[in-house]
Image (cartoon, rainbow, N blue to C red):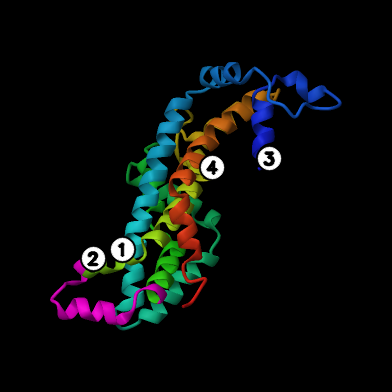
Amino acid sequence: MFPLYWTFVMASSDNSVLSETTPPLVPGGHLFDNISRVFDSVDFWVAIRNSLIISSAVALSNVLFSSLAGFAFAKLRFPGRDALMVVVIATLMVPTQLGIVPLYMLMSDIGLYGSLWAVILPGMVSAFGVFWMRQAIDEGIPDELVEAARVDGAGLFLIWWKVIVPGVRNTASVLGLFVFMTAWNDFFWPLVVLPADNGTVQTALNQLAAGYYTDYALMLSGAVLAVIPLLILFALLARRVIAGVMSGAVKG
């Protein structure tokens, strides 16, 4: 917690504090002045809006597609299922940076360069999410429950919606939170594919740090603004996150 508190202390002070031999541990009175300077320096409202749109879309799509794929890998029987799962897991070993150039060329060719879709589409599903949900469904949903739903005449999508989703709701919340945080903190790909005037929170923070002189009070004020949505989201999902992390930890 101390780094967060220290960020807040520095964001509420001016740059003269940095030169003091013993920096203060109590917040100063310049927080709102520094926040006002943040919005005057960059279009931070646009950056927050874009980050919320991108992170929410990526988190929701990951939960949706990962739960569907996890259901298929965990409970359905089809040729090559295990081999395909190995291929999915193997993609985790490929560095993301290797795909930047071809992905950039693809987004340019299909006319999405500079659009938020260029950031949303590549992150709509992830190998980690598929593996996470596959493990949760395999261990948390009994095969007998799925078979009972089939006997009652339920189709695959109805089984997924009525049996699988309620059973892994907490685990899906944890996945959604992780993916939201990852998308919110992503810097490299939005910097490559989005223009400076239509960027995300992280690219806006980069603009605050640019130049020959680093205004630390300004930059850390932007960092405080950037972390507030994550703290609010964690507070809202705290109960589900704890339940999702602890699910499976105790076998009864």
Question: Quick one: 195 or 250, which is closer to the camera?
Answer: 250
The 10 Å Cα crowd at callout 1, few under 14, some 14 to 19, many 20 or more, is few
Q: Can the viewer see residue 40?
A: yes
Residue wearing tag 2: 162
Q: Can residue 210 be seen in this view?
A: no
**Label 3: which residue?**
3
Foreground: disc 1 or disc 3: 1
Counting other residues with Cα less than 10 Å from the Cα at mark 4, is it few (<14), some (14-19), or many (20 or more)?
Answer: some
* Amino acid on which the number 2 mark rests in the picture: Lys
The reply to whether the C-beta atoms of the residues labelled 1 and 3 are less than 8 Å apart is: no
CB atoms of marks 4 and 2 within 8 Å: no
CA gap, disc 1 and disc 3: 37 Å
* Disc with the residue nearer the chain's start (1 vs 4): 1
Residue segment shown in magenta: 139-158
Q: What is the C-alpha distance between the residues marked 1 and 2?
A: 7 Å
The type of residue carrying mark 1 is Pro
Task: Tell which of 201 and 229 is nearer to you.
Answer: 229
Q: Is residue 234 left or right of residue 25?
A: left
Task: Tell me the residue at 49%/30% (across/down).
Answer: 196
Relative to 87, is 18 above or below?
A: above
Q: Quadrant of the N terminus?
A: top right
Horizontal arrangement in the rendering, residue 93 relative to residue 127 (left or right): right
Instruction: Indicate yes or no whether the magenta region holds residue 151.
Output: yes
Across and down, in percent, residue 246 comes to: 50, 65
Q: Tell me the element at label 2.
A: helix
